[in-house]
C-alpha cells in the first residue's frame, strides 16, 4: 500500500512539475509578444497550447500512431496489433485515406479522440474484457492510430500526417525492406524528430520477404541510417504483419510504454524543452539589466536643458532680484525698476494656480530647444537605451531602443506643461523685505521732514522773518541731521538690501531648479524610463518562464 501511495505521489509530483514547465513556456511566449519574431514565437506558442490541452486530456490513455509509406504494411500491422480487420490494406497506392483509431479498454476517451480530430465513424472500441491473455490486458489505455500514408499524392493526407505527428504520445515508424532508405522519410520526419527519440520506435515490416541470411545485414543498415539521423538508441524491431513474426515483441514493447504511462509526459517534456531551447537561443541568457542612476541623471540634465529649465531658473533669479530691490531699494530710485519687464511675466510663468492650469493646457513662452539641445537629448536617450540593452540579445535590445523613443512625440508638450504648472516659489516677498521697506519709507519721510524744515528756515531767512531756535542733536542741527541721515541711511540700507537680495534670489533660484528638475524627472520617468522598464520586466518574465520550462 505504501509503495502504491509513493508511486502516486511521484506521478503527481511529475505532473505538477510538467504543468509548471508548460505554464513557464506559456508565460515566456506571452511576455515575448511583439519583441520576438513571430516566425520564432508561433511554434513555441503552439507547443504551449498543445501541451496544456494534452495535460487536461485523459491521463490514462496513451496515443500511439503507426506511420509509414505506401506499401510499408502500416495498416496490416495495425490489424495485427488490434486483432481486428479494421484498416484497409493495399500495396500499390495510398490506401489509408483517413486516420483510424482503435481504443483498448472499457473507458471511451471521447474528449481525447475529439481533440485528435478522429471522426466517430473511424473509432473502434476494443474491449479487452472480451479477450483472454495478459498481452491484451496490458494494452488497456492504448489508443492506436493508423495514419494516412505520408507519401500520398493527396495534400490532405500530408497535412493529416503532419498534424497528428504533433499530437501523438508515441510514434511507431513502419519501414519497408525495399524503401527503408528513402530520403523522404529520413529528411522530412525521422531526422527532424531526433529530439523525440524517447517516444519513438521503428519497425522493419515484411521481414518474411527477406532471405534469412540477409536479415541481419538489412537490420544493421537500418540501424546505421537511424544513427545518422540521431536516432541510434531508438528501439528497432523486425516484424511481419502477414505471418505474425515479431508482432508479439512489438505488442510487448508498446504495452510497456502504455503501462508506464510515461510516453505522454516524455512527449510533452520533449516538446516543451525543445521549444524553450529554441526560444531561449533567440532571447539570450543575459541577466536582467537595470536602469542606472548616472544614465537617468544624464538624461534628466539633457531634457531639463532642452525644456528651458536654465532659462526659467535665470528668470526666477532675475524676478526675485527685481522684486526684492523694488521693495528694499531707496524709494526715490526704486520705482525706476518698474520700467523694466519682469522676466517671469515675460515667460507667462508668474501666474496664480488657476491661471497656471489654464496656461498648462496651451504653451508657455519658453524658447524652443535649439539643434544642439535636441541633439543632446537624442544622445542621452541613445546612451540610456544602449547602456541598458547592452547585455541583451538583438531582438530585446531593439525592443528597449524602440521603447526609449516610443513616447518621444509627447515629450515636448508634457515638459512644457510640467514647467508651466510647477510652483516656482516667487509669489511673495520675504518678511525681512517688508521690514526693510518700512524702514526705507521711515528714512525717506525723515529726509523729507529734514529737507522741508531746512527749506522753511531758508525761506524765513530770505524774508527776514525771525527764525525759531533750531534743535540740535550731538552738536548738529536736527533738520540737517534728518535730511542727511535719512538719505545716507536709506542708501546704505539699499546697498545692504542688494546683498541680501542677491543671496535670497540665488536661494529661490536653487529651490525653483530643484522643483523644476523634479517635474522634468517625473516626465522622463513616465515617458522614457517606464516604457524601458516595461520591456525589461517583459524580458525578466520571459527568462523566468524559460527557466521554468527548461526545468
Image: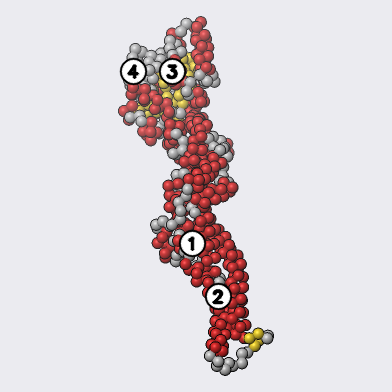
Checking the image for residue 153, the label placed there is 4
Corner quadrant of residue 128:
top left
Whole-angstrom CA distance, mark 2 to mark 3, is: 101 Å
Q: Which mark is residue 140?
A: none
Q: CA distance from mark 2 to mark 1?
A: 22 Å
Can residue 102 be seen here? The reply is: no
Q: Earlier in the sequence, mark 2 or mark 1?
A: 1
Tell me: residue 390, above or below residue 198. below
Q: Is residue 257 left or right of residue 93?
A: right
Q: Nearer the viewer, mark 4 or mark 1?
A: 1
* SS for callout 4: loop
Res 38 quadrant in image = top left
Which badge, 3 or 4, comes first in the chain's sequence? 4
Gap in angstroms between the C-alphas marked 3 and 1: 83 Å
Mark 1 = which residue?
A: 343
Q: Position of residue 523 (x, y in %)?
A: 48, 53
Q: Where is residue 161 drawn, in percent x and y?
A: 39, 24
Tag 2–tag 4 contact (CB < 8 Å)? no
Q: Is residue 399 visible?
A: yes
Residue at 48% from the left image edge and 14% from the top image edge: 238
Query: Which numbered mark, 2 or 4, is in the foreground of this view?
Result: 2
Toward which corner of the image does residue 67 lie, by quadrant? top left
- Residue tagged 3: 185
Q: Secondary structure at mark 2?
A: helix
> Sequence order check: which comes first, mark 4 or mark 1?
4
Give the residue pinned by disc 2: 437
The foreground one among 318 and 1 is 318
- What residue is shown at x 41% (from left), y 56% (from top)? 363
Q: Position of residue 157 (x, y in %)?
A: 35, 22
Residue 283: x %, y % from top left: 51, 35
The residue at 36%/25% (across/down) is: 159
Amino acid at each position: 500500500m505504501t509503495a502504491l501511495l509513493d508511486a502516486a505521489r511521484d506521478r503527481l509530483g511529475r505532473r505538477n512539475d510538467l504543468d509548471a514547465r508548460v505554464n513557464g513556456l506559456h508565460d515566456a511566449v506571452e511576455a515575448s509578444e511583439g519583441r520576438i519574431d513571430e516566425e520564432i514565437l508561433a511554434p513555441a506558442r503552439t507547443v504551449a497550447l498543445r501541451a496544456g490541452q494534452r495535460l487536461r486530456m485523459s491521463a490514462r490513455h496513451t496515443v500511439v500512431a503507426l506511420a509509414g509509406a505506401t506499401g510499408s504494411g502500416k495498416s496490416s500491422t495495425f490489424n495485427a496489433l488490434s486483432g481486428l480487420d479494421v484498416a484497409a490494406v493495399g500495396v500499390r497506392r495510398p490506401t489509408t485515406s483517413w486516420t483510424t483509431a482503435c481504443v483498448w479498454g472499457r473507458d471511451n476517451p471521447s474528449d481525447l479522440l475529439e481533440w485528435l480530430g478522429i471522426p466517430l465513424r473511424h473509432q473502434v472500441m476494443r474491449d479487452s474484457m472480451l479477450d483472454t491473455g495478459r498481452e491484451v490486458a496490458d494494452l488497456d489505455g492504448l489508443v492506436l492510430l493508423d495514419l494516412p500514408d505520408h507519401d500520398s499524392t493527396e495534400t490532405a493526407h500530408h497535412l493529416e500526417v503532419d498534424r497528428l505527428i504533433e499530437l501523438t504520445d508515441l510514434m511507431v515508424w513502419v519501414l519497408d525492406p525495399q524503401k527503408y532508405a528513402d530520403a523522404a522519410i529520413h529528411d522530412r520526419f525521422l531526422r527532424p524528430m531526433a529530439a523525440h527519440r524517447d517516444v519513438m520506435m521503428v519497425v522493419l515490416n515484411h521481414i518474411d520477404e527477406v532471405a534469412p541470411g540477409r536479415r541481419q545485414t538489412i537490420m544493421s543498415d537500418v540501424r546505421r541510417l537511424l544513427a545518422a539521423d540521431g536516432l541510434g538508441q531508438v528501439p528497432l524491431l523486425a516484424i511481419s504483419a502477414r505471418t505474425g513474426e515479431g508482432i508479439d515483441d512489438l505488442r510487448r514493447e508498446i504495452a510497456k510504454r502504455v503501462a508506464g504511462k510515461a510516453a505522454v509526459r516524455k512527449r510533452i517534456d520533449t516538446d516543451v524543452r525543445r521549444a524553450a531551447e529554441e526560444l531561449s537561443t533567440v532571447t539570450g541568457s543575459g541577466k536582467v539589466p537595470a536602469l542606472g542612476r548616472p544614465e537617468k541623471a544624464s538624461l534628466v540634465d539633457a531634457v531639463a536643458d532642452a525644456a528651458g529649465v536654465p532659462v526659467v531658473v535665470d528668470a526666477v533669479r532675475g524676478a526675485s532680484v527685481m522684486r526684492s530691490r523694488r521693495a528694499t531699494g531707496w524709494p526715490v530710485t526704486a520705482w525706476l525698476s518698474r520700467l523694466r519687464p519682469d522676466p517671469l511675466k515675460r515667460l507667462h510663468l508668474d501666474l496664480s494656480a488657476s491661471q497656471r492650469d489654464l496656461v498648462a493646457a496651451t504653451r508657455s513662452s519658453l524658447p524652443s530647444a535649439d539643434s544642439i539641445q535636441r541633439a543632446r537629448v537624442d544622445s542621452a536617450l541613445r546612451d540610456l537605451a544602449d547602456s541598458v540593452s547592452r547585455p541583451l540579445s538583438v531582438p530585446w535590445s531593439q525592443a528597449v531602443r524602440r521603447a526609449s523613443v516610443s513616447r518621444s512625440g509627447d515629450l515636448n508638450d508634457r515638459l512644457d506643461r510640467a514647467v508651466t504648472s510647477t510652483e516656482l516659489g516667487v509669489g511673495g516677498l520675504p518678511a525681512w523685505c517688508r521690514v526693510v521697506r518700512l524702514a526705507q519709507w521711515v528714512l525717506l519721510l525723515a529726509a523729507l521732514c529734514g529737507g522741508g524744515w531746512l527749506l522753511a528756515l531758508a525761506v524765513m531767512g530770505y524774508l527776514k522773518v525771525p527764525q525759531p531756535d533750531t534743535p540740535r542733536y550731538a552738536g548738529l542741527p536736527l533738520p540737517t541731521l534728518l535730511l542727511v541721515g535719512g538719505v545716507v541711511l536709506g542708501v546704505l540700507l539699499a546697498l545692504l538690501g542688494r546683498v541680501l537680495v542677491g543671496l535670497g534670489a540665488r536661494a529661490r533660484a536653487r529651490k525653483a531648479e530643484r522643483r523644476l528638475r523634479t517635474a522634468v524627472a517625473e516626465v522622463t520617468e513616465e515617458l522614457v524610463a517606464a516604457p524601458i522598464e516595461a520591456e525589461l520586466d517583459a524580458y525578466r518574465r520571459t527568462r523566468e518562464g524559460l527557466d521554468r520550462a527548461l526545468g
